[in-house]
């Protein structure tokens, strides 16, 4: 008979939190972990005394490559005031945090500890593609990968109007380049098309925003919020209604947008374009 495995005693998760997602030039992974840790403490219904935490399990895979610092779990423990409690770092590629959770559960179920802190943290957004693939076993040129890439592109194209002749990005469009690389047509027939027919925001004298062409990559948000600190653009709504727009659905002309055009420069598909001023 197959052996049935069960935990020695019940285990419950009493608090949870996560840091904000994005690119933050003035923060590192320690700051992210502290942010999540403090929010976690406030999320516990009946409160928890940090002194009662017996041990820490931290999932982290990339620190040695990207931050050039090992021994990360004890450093995190010290940073949040838990040194010299036992702090173990778990590595398992993308499953590092899941491994940390697994070990935390086993530690409590075995009766060795009563309360443990489990977390996961990675810092990759400041690195180049070459840096983030260092030390990883990566294969991107197999037929299986190409098939997945073609499917992903076709799904994007299913909701992207093919109006290349009138598009400001024509000839410099990332979708055109990827379609050419993968040897597929822009007018795909595999998936049902779903175009949203949203109003174009041409209220600003320097910038035009066409949400119908947008693929929601978020590069314009990064340019506006992180690089320029203007904050004129962000995500709005959820699910298949998600768009990039000014806060509250305002027009661009009613925001702090100064028409610098950085959002248009980073847009891969022409959804945001810089208006051409004609002299008479």
Image (tube, rainbow, N blue to C red):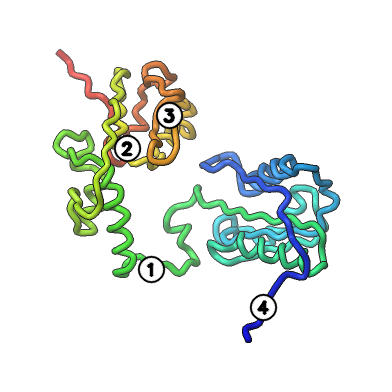
Position of the C terminus, as image quadrant, is top left
Q: Check disc 1 and report its element: helix, strand or loop.
A: loop
Q: Quadrant of residue 183?
A: bottom left
> Mark 4 = which residue?
4
Q: CA distance from mark 1 to mark 3?
A: 36 Å
> Going from the N terminus, do you reach mark 2 or mark 3 first?
2
Report the residue at 76% width, 66% height from top: 109
Q: Give the foreground label among 4 and 2.
A: 4
Position of the N terminus, as image quadrant, is bottom right
Q: CA distance from mark 4 to mark 2?
A: 51 Å
Q: CA distance from mark 3 to mark 4?
A: 53 Å
Q: CA distance from mark 4 to mark 1?
A: 38 Å
Q: Give the foreground label among 4 and 1.
A: 4
Report the residue at 31% width, 28% height from top: 209
Q: Check disc 4 and report its element: helix, strand or loop.
A: loop
Residue 162 sits above or below residue 11 on the image: above
> Mark 1 = which residue?
139
> Going from the N terminus, do you reach mark 4 or mark 2 first?
4
Q: CA distance from mark 2 to mark 1?
A: 29 Å
> Mark 2 = which residue?
214
Report the residue at 44% width, 19% height from top: 256
Q: CA distance from mark 2 to mark 3?
A: 13 Å
> Going from the N terminus, do you reach mark 2 or mark 1 first?
1
Give yes or no for contact between labels 4 and 2 (Cβ–Cβ under 8 Å): no
Give yes or no for contact between labels 1 and 3 (Cβ–Cβ under 8 Å): no
For label 4, count other residues whose C-alpha is less than 10 Å away and answer few (under 14), some (14-19) or many (20+). few
> Mark 3 = which residue?
233
Residue 92 sits above or below residue 22 on the image: below
For label 1, count other residues whose C-alpha is less than 10 Å away and answer few (under 14), some (14-19) or many (20+). few
Q: Check disc 3 and report its element: helix, strand or loop.
A: loop
């Amino acid at each position: 008979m197959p052996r049935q495995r069960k935990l020695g005693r019940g285990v419950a998760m009493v608090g949870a939190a996560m840091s904000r997602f994005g690119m933050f030039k003035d923060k590192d992974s320690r700051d992210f972990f502290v942010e999540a840790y403090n929010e976690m403490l406030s999320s516990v219904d009946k409160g928890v005394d940090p002194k009662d935490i017996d041990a820490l399990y931290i999932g982290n895979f990339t620190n040695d490559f990207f931050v050039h610092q090992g021994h990360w779990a004890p450093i995190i423990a010290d940073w949040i005031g838990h040194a010299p409690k036992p702090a173990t770092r778990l590595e398992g590629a993308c499953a590092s945090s899941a491994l940390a959770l697994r070990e935390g559960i086993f530690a409590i179920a075995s009766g060795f500890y009563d309360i443990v802190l489990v977390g996961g943290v990675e810092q990759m957004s400041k690195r180049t593609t070459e840096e983030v693939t260092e030390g990883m076993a990566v294969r991107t040129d197999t037929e299986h990968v190409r098939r997945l890439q073609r499917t992903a592109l076709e799904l994007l194209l299913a909701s992207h109007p093919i109006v290349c002749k009138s598009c400001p990005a024509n000839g410099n469009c990332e979708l055109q380049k990827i379609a050419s690389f993968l040897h597929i047509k822009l007018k795909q027939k595999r998936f049902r098309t779903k175009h949203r027919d949203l109003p174009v925001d041409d209220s600003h004298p320097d910038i035009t925003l066409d949400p119908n062409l947008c693929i929601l990559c978020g590069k314009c948000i990064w340019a506006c919020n992180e690089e320029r600190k203007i904050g004129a653009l962000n995500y709005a709504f959820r699910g298949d209604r998600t768009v990039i727009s000014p806060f509250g659905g305002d027009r661009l002309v009613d925001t702090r947008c100064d028409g610098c055009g950085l959002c248009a420069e980073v847009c891969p598909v022409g959804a945001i374009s810089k208006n051409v001023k004609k002299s008479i």
